[in-house]
Amino acid sequence: MTIRRRDFLKTGLVAAGASVAPELVGQAPRTQPQVPASDLDELTITDLRTERKTGPKSARELTERYLDRIKEIDKGGPGLNSVIEINPDALAIAGQLDAERGAKGPRGPMHGIPVLIKDNIATADKMETTAGSLALVGSKPPKDSAVAAKLRAAGAIILGKTNLSEWANFRGDHSTSGWSGRGGLTHNPYALDRNCSGSSSGSGAAASANLCMVAVGTETDGSIVSPSSINGLVGIKPTVGLVGRSGIVPISHTQDTAGPMARTVTDAAILLTALAGPDAGDPATAGSQAHVADYTRFLDAGGLRGARLGVVRKLAGFSRHVDKLFDEALAALKHAGAEVIDPVEVNAIGKVDEAELQVLLYEFKADLNRYLAEWAPGAPIRTLKDAIEFNIKNSARELPYFGQETMVKAEEKADLSSTEYQKYLADCRWLSRAEGIDGAMDKLKLDALIAPTDSPAWPTDLVNGDHFSGSSSTVPAVAGYPHVTVPMGFCFGLPVGISFFGRAWSEGVLIKLAYAFEQLTKARKPPKFLAHVEA
């Protein structure tokens, strides 16, 4: 089972509780759509901070422009179908923030910045929080999630929610990333018949297509870094415990985290600074304050000089096209002054997968039941067992393409006091850390490990499901350690990322390395919204 894991309809699709036949949602156009250029294209937070010399001059104007672009590109034109719902209060909030800026000055760099967040992050407002499932339509969280609260405190504008792989792609075998019963199918902005990967599919497509300034995704194993790589973005999967998880529809309390998805390392660092810090509802963040920083201070264009980087060759070799880009990236790293140790053995690779799956099955049952009791009042389901039964009763809308075998396996598990669970959890920690990242880095005194992030996007296939061919996400995900992906280049017009990952709480080091690589290569190119890949 793969853990990582898209306008036919108009604006009515994003209204709360919209119900449509899933085969009609998010069909890709068969001819090349025309997308006009915009001064929002590749606009960054830094651009706006420079005395607003570029683009819209107020938060309200900026928000209006993004809303228009969503209507034009996401719900019309190419029909990306990446935004599942718009915040009806976005313009009012933007106006209030403009007034506050005029009276008191900005709260910080995120003041007045429109952000899209994944539809598994709870907001106590007029929007839904459904994880893409019709079973959670109508439930109203009693308060904001820690992520939403942090964004509001920083002065960000939550523009809306993004589509995702339903239940963060922890539902069934042969799933199609970027499909949910509530939201339909999201399309890749580089080639509309290609997949966005997942589960943060909508966040990846929306940020890449310039439908927002930055986006927030969540990851258990690959769900930030994979859609970031495949949509030509920078993605930061933080150390588990750096960003609070209360109010996020869970899979696993040992692996889940939220993190930034952005077009530049700078914007991702700004967003991570806003998101990081303790969360009273998340015990894993208790020690995070010692590691919280202004991550923009690590943005050093010379940051590769003298760095010791270990090449994890076992995570490459799945594509000669990706290998060519990776070898070119290694040459660039060496040219910039990095010492590249090639290859480096990470003993955990291939050994941790079964233990990870078993831990996730146990934790999904326990953590989801806890979330539903606390965060989903009014939902027609109260437990994982209820969700399974809901899907059976609503199979025409929820199970038209793939099943819920993963959910069924999780429901069969005992509680977290199980000896079996404790053994698998200990195996995960030992293999991914001592026998994995820490072991390899300590032995060779490395600053980071590097590998290709993922394969290029594959053709979306609702009949057979996803076609993953390679990924570097599992070991850092199981360890709970940070992982940063940055654009590396293109295969037939499809973006591919390079990954930097390392020890717990090493976000600053990884951001420095990723920023220096980004400035050296300038690999990102905006999408062209092609109907098909031009091979």
Image: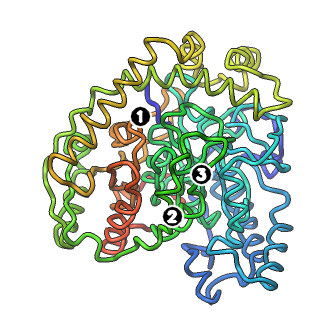
The spot of residue 360 in percent (x, y) is 49, 25
- Name the N-terminal-most of marks 1 and 3: 3
* Crowd around label 1: few <14 · some 14–19 · many ≥20 (10 Å): some
* Crowd around label 3: few <14 · some 14–19 · many ≥20 (10 Å): many
The spot of residue 313 in percent (x, y) is 19, 44
* Crowd around label 2: few <14 · some 14–19 · many ≥20 (10 Å): many
Give the residue drawn at x 53%, y 37%: 177
- From the image, state whether disc 2 or disc 1 is nearer to you: 2
Circle 2 residue:
268
Give the spatial CA distance, label 3 vs label 2. Answer: 19 Å
Q: Is residue 492 visible?
A: yes
Q: Examine the rendered structure and indicate whether residue 168 appears above or below residue 532.
A: above
With 224 as the anchor, is 114 left or right in this view?
A: right
Circle 3 residue:
278
- Camera-nearest residue between 457 and 213: 213
Quarter of the figure that contains the N terminus:
top left
Circle 1 residue:
467
With 393 as the anchor, is 336 left or right in this view?
A: left
Kind of residue sitting beneath label 2? Ala
